């Protein structure tokens, strides 16, 4: 189930034009991803934390999201320092800890957390529908916008169909075991789900054609650049340029 | 305008889904202006297929489809008539695909080239007419089955069609939503065809009921007065049926 735990956040950020938020978050994420200097990355993380604080989202939910990503990063902390090569700072027998590996792992940690936080604060606080329409206005190809909106709409229907199938095999006494019958049943479930999804897609498309659909999606939403949006984009531009200057000055 | 003017004319329609025995077999049918036709027939007798042929979602193997006096041949012909004929699908989940109710109801009018303001106005009017005025910003997939059905009807009515094709509009609905649909149909002065298994519903909403058999439509225009012998408790007390 796709839930949108951040979409109902109420904060000053909700009054900013979604397009502005998407553009700002993208520019800022790319800048963060391309910077190397630690002062810049720490500055970047600080900005992200600041954005999260004013975004009015449930901080517990944010921490849960961060935990998932940092679980992956944890493995990098095990792998990189041991295998990266270069200058070893510590050695126990054949096992060596390499300094460049530690530095790289630290950079990845800072960058991914900073980008994740800013995306939660600025993009995840929109509903998928708003996001789709905003991307549409930003000249994102119509097919991709459609893909996003229809996925959002029908993932629930497909999930319901999946549950229907699972229920129907359960009431006939199916319990998964390690045998051919189980594998075959699961193959049927997946196959049936694919067929039903494809047929559903046909019917939805037919219903859309009946209502005059010709491949063009007309969005009802009107986005307006208001004064808050202008202030916000000025601040974000300033901070992003600040990051670039910090990066350049560090490299000398 | 002559009330008995034919607006949909099917002649010699043959249709089969690939490699299966034919569903429609040399079918002829005429639908007149202001006609209210009910179809009651067993599953698999081709009722839904018939609707899909009229909308141009399926093409007949042979035969001609004439709608509003024009022979339908190409997809382009059908694109034009789809604005004038509204098809309500059996499953409301097929019909509602936008995230919010208002967007879904406005989808048809926008496709017809109406401006945003016009589309929103007409959508609000339609929702109002169906008693759904506070549904605008509801999320479509979170509606109940009955609400979904009424909203799907709104998405069709907002295109202001001249003919409605309703494919089992009552299936899966509670009695309250069922009676809302009956009310709405009687309030509108429209031509329509309804597929249903509910003979009482068809009697209340249509002026002729057809059946289908062997890929043909059995038209029964005449009303026969007839008697049944029947048995029930308290039958000896004077009563009415």
Image: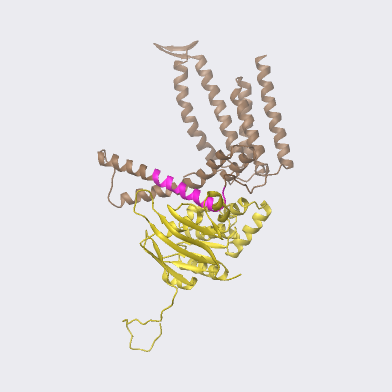
Q: Give the image quarter of residue B13.
A: bottom left
In this view, the residue in front, B73 or B208, is B73
Q: Is residue A198 magenta?
A: yes
Vertical side of B52 occupied by A131: above or below: above
Height in image: B26 above or below B183? above
Tally of numbered discs? 0
Q: Position of residue A185 (x, y in %)?
A: 30, 43
Measuring 59% from the left and 38% from the top, which residue is drawn there?
A: A123
Query: Which one is in front, A147 or B49?
Result: B49
Q: Which corner quadrant of the image does residue A131 belong to?
A: top right
B59 sits to left or right of A171: right
Residue B16 position in % (x across, y down): 39, 53
Q: Residue at x 52, y 36 (%)?
A: A63
Q: Residue at x 40, y 43 (%)?
A: A194
For residue A84, side relative to residue A169 (left or right)? right
Can you name the residue that lies furthest to the right here? Answer: A227
The magenta segment: A194-213
Q: Colour of chain B?
A: yellow
User: Is A137 contained in the magenta span?
Assistant: no
Q: Is residue B78 visible?
A: yes
Above-or-below relation of A89 to A226 = above
Q: Looking at the picture, how far across and down is residue A47, in whole percent?
A: 64, 31
Q: Nearer the viewer, residue B8 or A4?
A: B8
Left or right, residue A246 beside residue A99: right
Chain A: colour as depicted: brown
- Residue A160 location in percent, x, y? 42, 49
| A78 vs B100, nearest the viewer | B100
């Amino acid at each position: 189930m796709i839930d949108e735990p951040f979409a109902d956040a109420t904060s000053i950020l909700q009054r900013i034009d979604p397009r502005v938020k998407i553009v700002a978050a993208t520019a800022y994420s790319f800048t963060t991803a391309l910077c190397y200097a630690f002062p810049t990355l720490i500055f970047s993380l600080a900005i992200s934390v600041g954005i999260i604080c004013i975004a009015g989202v449930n901080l517990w939910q944010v921490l849960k999201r961060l935990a998932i990503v940092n679980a992956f990063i944890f493995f990098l902390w095990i792998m990189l320092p041991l295998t990266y090569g270069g200058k070893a700072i510590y050695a126990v027998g054949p096992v060596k800890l390499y300094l460049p590996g530690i530095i790289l792992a630290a950079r990845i940690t800072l960058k991914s957390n900073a980008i994740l936080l800013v995306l939660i604060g600025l993009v995840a606080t929109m509903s998928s529908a708003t996001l789709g329409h905003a991307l549409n206005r930003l000249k994102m190809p119509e097919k991709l916008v459609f893909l996003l909106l229809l996925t959002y709409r029908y993932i629930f229907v497909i999930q319901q169909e999946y549950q229907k199938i699972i229920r129907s095999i359960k009431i006939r006494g199916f319990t998964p075991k390690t045998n051919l019958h189980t594998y075959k049943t699961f193959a049927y479930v997946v196959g049936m789900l694919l067929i039903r999804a494809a047929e559903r897609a046909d019917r939805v498309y037919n219903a859309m054609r009946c209502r005059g659909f010709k491949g063009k999606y007309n969005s009802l939403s009107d986005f307006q650049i208001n004064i808050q949006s202008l202030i916000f984009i000025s601040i974000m531009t300033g901070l992003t340029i600040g990051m670039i200057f910090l990066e350049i000055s560090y490299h000398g | 305008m002559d009330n008995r003017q034919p607006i949909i004319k099917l002649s010699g329609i043959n249709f089969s889904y690939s490699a299966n025995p034919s569903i429609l077999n040399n079918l002829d049918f005429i639908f007149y202006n202001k006609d209210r036709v009910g179809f009651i027939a067993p599953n698999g007798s081709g009722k839904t297929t018939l609707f899909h042929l009229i909308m141009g979602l399926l093409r007949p193997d042979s035969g001609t489809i004439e709608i509003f006096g024009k022979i339908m041949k190409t997809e382009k012909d059908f694109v034009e008539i789809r604005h004038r004929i509204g098809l309500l699908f059996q499953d409301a989940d097929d019909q509602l695909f936008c995230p919010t109710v208002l967007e879904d109801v406005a989808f048809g009018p926008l496709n017809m080239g109406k401006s945003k303001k016009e589309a929103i106005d007409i959508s609000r009017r339609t929702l109002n007419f169906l008693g759904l005025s506070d549904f605008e910003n509801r999320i479509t997939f979170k509606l109940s089955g009955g609400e979904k059905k009424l909203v799907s009807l709104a998405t069709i009515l907002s295109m202001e069609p001249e003919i409605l094709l309703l494919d089992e509009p009552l299936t899966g609905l509670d009695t309250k939503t069922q009676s809302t649909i009956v009310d709405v149909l009687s309030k509108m002065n429209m031509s329509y065809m309804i597929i249903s298994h509910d003979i009482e519903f068809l009697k209340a909403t249509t002026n002729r009921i057809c059946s289908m058999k062997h890929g043909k439509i059995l038209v029964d225009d005449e009303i026969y007065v007839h008697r049944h012998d029947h048995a029930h408790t308290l039958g000896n007390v004077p009563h009415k049926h």
